[in-house]
Image (tube, rainbow, N blue to C red):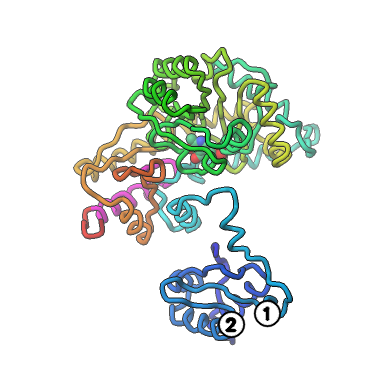
Amino acid sequence: MSEIEWKPKRNSRQSLTFQIVTYMKKKILNGEWTIGMKLPSQRKMAKQFDVNRSTIVSALEELVADGFLQSKVGSGTNVVNNTWSLIASSPPPDWVSYVKSGIHEPNITMIQKINEAEADSKMIRLGTGELAPELLPVEDMKRLMQINETETLFLGYEEPKGSLTLRKTICENLKRKGIDVSPASILIVSGALQALQLISIGLLKRGSVIFHETPSYLNSVHVFQSAGMNLFGVSIDHEGINHEEIGVLKKQHHGALLYTIPSYHNPTSILMSENRRKQVLDMCQQESLPIIEDDVYGELWFDYPPPKPIKANDHNGNVLYIGSVSKSLSPGLRIGWLVGPEPVIDRLADIKMQTDYGSSSISQHMVQKWMVSGMYDEYLAHVRKELKKKRDFMLDVLNSYYSDIAIWEIPKGGFFIWLQFKIDISIRSLFEVSLKEGILLNPGSVYDKNDRKHLRLSYSYASLQEIEEGLIHLSKIIRAKEHC
Ligand SMILES: Cc1ncc(COP(=O)(O)O)c(C=O)c1O
């Protein structure tokens, strides 16, 4: 059962129990709640409906007595019947078993919990990898959205690789990073994540092995695993992924691809050095191992820009380069780009056409306006400055309250501080306890299932006040050792 907006009316003549029973019956009768579906705990429902637990108990008892629900000790309450199923000659579809057999793997439970908690506006989000609403350029966007009489606006389907005008503009932007490509080598996608999705289904065989940094953002999404691939972690040091290990592992495990985030890596914020970029490219060329270079944080540098992307030195078509406006302008536009050899881009454009017939033409139009007007560059300069202030503030709070219990590096860009605890602590129970206290964390295990000692902190989303309050409160929870 996902988030419920509805709540019983307190000023109604009908009792709260009656209203809840009626609401639930309707959900079951119209098939929104299917047979076999498990209801949340009584405590959770009481919170969602804003009533006492005893009201929930009475409502559930009534629905059990009417035969709609069944409660079993230890396994909770499930929908077991709807009146249609009683009168129909053949049983309704068993949606629960369909849901279980879907090809795509579900999110890991911790991420499902994080996604759910993010809907609570009171939550202090100390790990969210997103720009704060007040950092997003809402007023400028409103102004740019006013389309004047002389401006052309295309509302049809765009061509398979996306708007040519936008691809030309992206080519110009990429030139400044040393990447010299033509629009034919670019595919506009609905965010960087879609680029990964297309690569997973369009280029690789089931059973392929994907190398990535340990830890990695890639572990927090199930894109490659759902397409039947295996992920394999490679170690990372202060200069980035270990290129020598890549060579050894390629031979041992027949790796099909390397996925890397060289600039302001998620979750560690490590910036791959210029030298390491060359070494990684050389090693991968030598081993015939294609690279996916994910550069979604590359624009978010603080004191100096990152070294040129790996793609800038790729003269053999070894690298698929991914960019996006999600971390720098607006995740809601859902616009990213994939740069690679033409046959790859043609193949993935063909799959994209079969998947969604192209990304939103209006979003593409907006990104084009931002970029070509110069406003994107201006806004980036502003975001870098603001993010740096927030980084410094978080570092100050950490220095005051965490220096005896944790260590961290100073990020040179991006969103994250990879906090490593020096003390023995259960991050899982810290996550649970903090969640109950209104603080949402991103444990390191989301990015490396074996991790037991890190938190991914982010200064991008929470306000300065929330960062201070949240981190001070968290340090108290940690010190009240009985919880952890
Ligand atoms: C490294 C990395 N790649 C890709 C994405 C997804 O970006 P988009 O919103 O453009 O799909 C994220 C978002 O968290 C990310 O951190």
Closer-to-camera residue (238/440): 238
What kind of secondary structure does the magenta stretch mostly adopt?
Answer: helix
| Residue 449 visible (yes or no) | yes
Give the amino acid at mark 1. Leu
Question: Disc 1 marks which residue?
Answer: 86
Contact flag, marks 2 and 1 (Cβ < 8 Å): yes
Residue 98: where, in percent of width, then height? 61, 59
Quadrant in the picture for residue 436 = bottom left
Q: Residue at image x 48%, y 44%?
A: 132
Instruction: Find residue 90 and report its image quarter.
Output: bottom right
Q: In which quarter of the image is residue 159?
A: top right
Q: Is mark 2 on a helix, strand or loop?
A: loop
Q: What residue type is labelled 2?
A: Gly
- Where residue 331 is drawn, which disc sits there? none
Residue 94: percent from the left, percent from the top? 63, 65
Residue 150 image offset from top left, x and y in percent = 80, 32
Q: What element carries label 1?
A: helix
Count of numbered labels shown in the rendering? 2
Q: Which mark is residue 67?
A: 2
261 up-or-down from 105: above or below = above
Work out how far the residue at label 2 is from the one at label 1, CA to CA, in angstroms. Answer: 10 Å
- Residue positioned 45% across, 38% down in the render: 217
Q: Is residue 257 magenta?
A: no
**Residue 476 within the magenta-colored segment of the rendering:** yes
Relative placement, left or right, of 34 versus 160 is left
